[in-house]
Every structure is written in structure tokens, then in C-alpha cells.
């Protein structure tokens, strides 16, 4: 995209995201297994992720309060600064409950994500919005392309705590890049300046918000339970789980740019219908397919294409003066629903480890029907 070639600040931001996601990719898929090693039962694991998602909602609530009032760059730096020590906090945990301070702090740092989305939206032409978010999703997925497999190898050989120390070093490099983003130009502050929110202003964005929330719930309900499912039910090693994480990232790298381009050309909703079908296929392959097909399932259930389309839908429908707060509201609602899903998912996993995956598939079917009905009404 031309805008990324000419905009130094966007390049720095994407570079910072790349190093950050390299660090996150090293350990994120291992956290449920790490918690199990530290003594968490399936229900306690679900509770851990419930609290994590509630903290995420709190982060977006902070984002709601500050997104359209404080410099985007200031919010970005604050987020990186508070997130930097998280891997070391996790590495120091003696029991699974001591994971909470690091996990909750990390989720609170999402207060800057609405500002990042608004920053990109305001610096990119509307006709390239889905492609721009696609580029962002692709860059972050590249970070997950190698790091989960590398994290699994390191964990098998030296333990998960060593993985977390390496992740901290990558976080440090990312923070250095964010410090170089200039505090000037489009997207630094809302074009119209901060203003009081009127609920009627949100009306044009409500359909996109509902879709965003549904898509996020569909994906996040699987997150706490996929690694234990693969380890305990499919009986694969930490290294193999890491390889599957890299395959998921490879799927995102290949599919996200395509989803972005199709979203700009065909429309966000029709493209999302097809991508939901891809996601559902991946989840079902993960649950039921023979072991040789697990990498295919991992690639198909990549989250970035759907996230890209949902973000573009919100960005295209939200009024400019409340752009940041609209993204914050989308994240907050998604996190609250994901918290409920994680809590219920712990009991579902205890009853049958496949149930959280099937809940995700059921949600996908409901979203598919809703999007098709909406498209038919418009047609």
C-alpha cells in the first residue's frame, strides 16, 4: 500500500507491533499449559481467563475515557511502557494465582488499542481501510509465524520461564520503536477535537459493533482451551503445539491480505460470510480430523482476517469525532462477553473438552445467518 511506503510513522508503528507480537507469540499459546503446570484445574483455568477478559474490558473502558481526549502517541507509549515488564512478572509466578498480576496488567494495556485503530483510520484513505487493517493484521501475524514454534522448542528444552525472558527482550525492542513515532500529523488527535458523546451518534455504527462483538466472542471462547485440548486430548507435544501456532500465523499471513482486498472490493459483510466458513472448517478439523490435518485446521482458524474485516466495518461506520471511543466500546463489549464465555467454557471443557470448540462453531453459524439475512435485505 502506498500510504505505508510514504508514512514513516505508520512504518514505525507496524515495526513496533511486529516485535511485540514476536514476543507475545513466543508464550501466549503456552500460558494455559503453564497455568496447568502451576496447579490450575480446567475450571480454575476458565476462571483465570474470565478475570483476564474482565481486565481487558477494563482496559477498553479506560480507552473509552481517553481515546479522543489524549494524544494517540502518548497513549501508545503508555501502553507499551506498562506492558514491558509483563513477561518477567509471569516468569516469576510460583503458582497459577500469581500469574494474575501480569496477565491483568497486560490486558489493561489495551487501553491504547482504540487509539491505534483511530490513528490508522485517520491516516488512511477510506477506500483502502480494509487493506490497511489487513496490513496491520498481516504484520502482527508475521510475528506469530515463527515465534510459537520457537517458543515451544525453547519450552521443551529449557522451560516456559526462559521463553518469557526472551519475550521481554523483544518487548524492549518494540518499545524503542514506539518511542520514535512522532507526535504530529493526521491521527494524532481527532480532527474535530474531543467532544461529548451523544448516544445517537453511535446509531450508524451499531450493526458493525454487534458483528464485531459476535466475531470476537466466537474466536476468544476457544483461546483458553485449545492448547490444553491439543495437549490433553490430541496428545501432542509443546513443540508440536508451537508448530500449530506458527501454522495459524501462516494462514493469517496468507489470508489476511486477501480478506482486506476482497473487503474493499466486494464489501466487508459478504467477505466476512466466506471467512466465517473458513474459520468454522478450521475449528472442526482441529476437533475431529486425523493428526496429519491438524496443521491445515490451524491455518484455517486464523483470527486476523475476521478481525481485520470487523475493524474495517467499525472504522467505516463510526463518526470521526467519536472514532476512538467507538473502537473502545467494541473492545469493551467483546471482552465482557468473552469473560462470560471463558467462565462457562471452563465448565464446558470439564464436561467434554470438545464443547468450547462446538460453542464457537454454533456462534459462527448464527453470525453467518445474520450476515446473510442482512445482505439479502439490502439486496
Image (spheres, grey):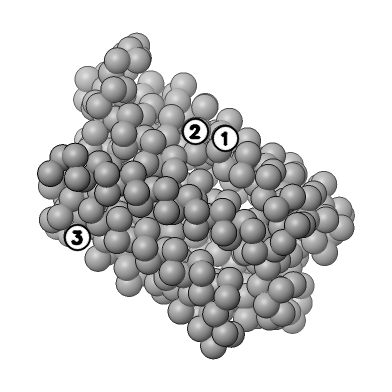
Judging by the rendered image, the residue that carries numbered circle 3 is 261
> Considering the numbered disc 2 on the image, is that residue within a helix, a strand or a loop?
helix
Q: Looking at the figure, which quarter contains the C terminus?
A: top left
Compared with 206, 287 (above or below) is below
Q: Which of 79 and 367 is in front in this view?
A: 367
Q: Which mark is residue 143?
A: none
Measure how far apart labels 2 and 3 are at the Cα level. Answer: 27 Å
Compared with 199, 174 (above or below) is below
Residue 280 visible, this angle: yes
Q: In this view, does 25 lie to the left or right of 260?
A: right
* Residue 368 point in image, percent of width and height: 35, 52
Compared with 139, 194 (above or below) is above
Compared with 332, 299 (above or below) is below
* Residue 253 point in image, percent of width and height: 36, 69
Measure how far apart labels 1 and 2 are at the Cα level. Answer: 5 Å
Compare marks 1 and 3 and give the one earlier in the sequence. Answer: 3
Of marks 2 and 3, the one in the foreground: 2
Judging by the rendered image, the residue that carries numbered circle 2 is 333
At x 18%, y 50%, the residue is: 267
Q: Which of 246 and 296 is in front in this view?
A: 296
At x 44%, y 59%, the residue is: 303
* Residue 341 point in image, percent of width and height: 61, 44
Judging by the rendered image, the residue that carries numbered circle 1 is 336
Q: Looking at the figure, which quarter contains the N terminus?
A: bottom left
At x 29%, y 61%, the residue is: 274
Asked if the residue at tag 3 contacts the one at tag 2, i.e. Cβ–Cβ closer than 8 Å, the answer is no
Asked if the residue at tag 2 contacts the one at tag 1, i.e. Cβ–Cβ closer than 8 Å, the answer is yes
Residue 219 visible, this angle: no
Q: In this view, does 290 lie to the left or right of 131?
A: right
Measure how far apart labels 1 and 3 are at the Cα level. Answer: 31 Å
Q: Nearer the viewer, residue 275 or 132?
A: 275
Q: Nearer the viewer, residue 76 or 225?
A: 225
Amino acid at each position: 500500500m502506498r500510504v505505508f511506503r510514504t508514512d514513516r510513522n505508520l512504518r514505525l508503528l507496524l515495526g513496533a507491533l511486529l516485535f511485540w507480537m514476536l514476543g507475545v507469540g513466543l508464550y501466549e499459546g503456552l500460558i494455559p499449559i503453564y497455568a496447568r503446570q502451576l496447579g490450575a484445574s480446567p475450571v480454575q483455568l476458565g476462571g483465570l481467563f474470565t478475570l483476564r477478559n474482565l481486565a481487558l474490558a477494563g482496559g477498553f473502558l479506560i480507552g473509552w475515557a481517553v481515546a479522543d481526549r489524549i494524544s494517540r502517541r502518548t497513549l501508545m507509549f503508555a501502553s507499551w511502557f506498562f506492558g514491558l515488564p509483563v513477561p518477567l512478572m509471569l516468569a516469576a509466578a510460583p503458582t497459577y494465582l500469581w500469574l494474575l498480576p501480569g496477565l491483568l496488567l497486560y490486558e489493561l494495556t489495551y487501553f491504547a488499542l482504540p487509539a491505534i485503530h483511530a490513528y490508522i483510520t485517520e491516516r488512511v484513505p477510506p477506500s483502502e481501510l480494509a487493506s490497511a487493517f489487513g496490513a496491520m493484521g498481516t504484520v502482527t501475524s508475521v510475528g506469530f509465524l515463527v515465534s510459537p514454534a520457537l517458543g515451544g522448542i525453547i519450552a521443551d528444552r529449557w522451560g516456559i520461564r526462559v521463553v518469557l525472558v526472551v519475550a521481554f527482550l523483544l518487548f524492549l525492542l518494540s518499545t524503542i520503536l514506539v518511542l520514535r513515532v512522532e507526535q504530529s500529523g493526521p491521527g494524532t488527535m481527532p480532527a474535530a477535537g474531543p467532544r461529548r458523546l451523544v448516544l445517537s451518534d453511535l446509531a450508524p455504527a451499531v450493526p458493525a459493533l454487534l458483528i464485531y462483538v459476535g466475531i470476537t466472542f466466537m474466536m476468544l471462547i476457544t483461546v483458553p482451551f485449545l492448547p490444553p485440548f491439543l495437549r490433553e486430548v490430541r496428545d501432542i507435544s509443546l513443540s508440536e503445539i508451537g508448530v500449530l501456532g506458527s501454522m495459524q500465523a501462516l494462514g493469517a499471513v496468507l489470508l489476511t491480505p486477501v480478506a482486506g482486498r476482497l473487503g474493499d472490493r466486494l464489501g466487508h459483510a459478504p467477505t466476512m460470510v466466506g471467512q466465517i466458513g473458513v474459520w468454522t472448517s478450521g475449528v472442526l478439523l482441529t476437533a475431529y480430523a486425523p493428526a496429519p490435518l491438524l496443521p491445515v485446521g490451524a491455518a484455517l482458524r486464523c483470527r486476523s482476517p475476521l478481525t481485520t474485516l470487523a475493524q474495517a466495518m467499525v472504522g467505516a461506520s463510526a463518526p470521526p469525532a467519536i472514532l476512538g471511543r467507538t473502537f473502545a466500546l467494541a473492545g469493551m463489549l467483546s471482552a465482557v462477553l468473552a469473560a462470560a464465555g471463558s467462565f462457562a467454557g471452563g465448565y464446558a471443557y470439564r464436561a467434554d473438552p470438545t464443547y468450547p470448540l462446538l460453542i464457537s462453531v454454533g456462534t459462527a453459524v448464527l453470525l453467518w445467518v445474520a450476515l446473510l439475512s442482512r445482505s439479502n435485505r439490502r439486496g
